[in-house]
Amino acid sequence: MNKNDLVETIANSAQISKSAAERGLNGLLSSLSAAIKDGKRVTLTGFGSFSVVDRAPRTGRNPKTGETIPIPSRRVVKFRPGKELSVKIQ
C-alpha cells in the first residue's frame, strides 16, 4: 500500500473527500516526524510505538573488496508493533 492507496482508504472509510483525507494524513505524518525528530516516543494504542535509538559504532565489511570498514554510531527510528497488531498479523 502506498500513500495514495492509504488516502483513498481513509476517504472511503470516513466518507470524506480525498483532499481532506490527504490533509489529515499529511498532518499526522508531520506531527509524527516532528515528535520523533525531537527524540520523543510516539505510541499509537493498538498499533504500535515509534522511538529513536542509538546504534553503537561497529565494523562492517565491503562486499566488493572484503575490506573491513568502520561504521559510525547513529540514531535510527525503531518501530515496535502493539499487541493488537501482532495478534492480527499472525
Image (cartoon, helix red, strand yellow):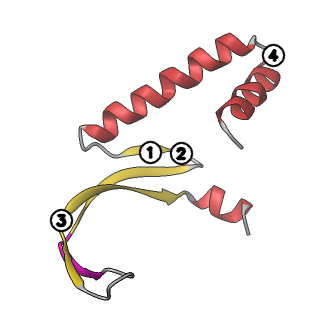
Q: Which residue is mark 4?
A: 15
Q: Residues within 10 Å of mark 3 (few under 14, many from 20)?
A: few
Q: CA distance from mark 1 to mark 2?
A: 6 Å
Looking at the rendered image, the disc whose residue lies closer to the viewer, 2 or 3, is 3
- What residue sits 75% from the left and 11% below the top? 17
- The picture places residue 4, in percent across and down from the top left corner, at 70, 29
Please name the amino acid that badge 1 sits on.
Thr
Looking at the rendered image, the disc whose residue lies closer to the viewer, 4 or 1, is 4
Q: Which residue is mark 1?
A: 43
Is 59 in the magenta?
Answer: yes
- What residue sits 64% from the left and 56% below the top? 84
- The picture places residue 67, in percent across and down from the top left corner, at 25, 86
Looking at the rendered image, the disc whose residue lies closer to the viewer, 2 or 4, is 4
Q: CA distance from mark 1 to mark 3?
A: 25 Å
Quarter that holds the C terminus:
bottom right
- Which disc number belongs to residue 68? none
Circles 1 and 2, Cβ within 8 Å, touching? The answer is yes
Return the residue nearer the eye: 81 or 2: 2
- In this image, 52 relative to 59: left or right? right
Q: CA distance from mark 4 to mark 1?
A: 26 Å
Q: Which residue is mark 2?
A: 45
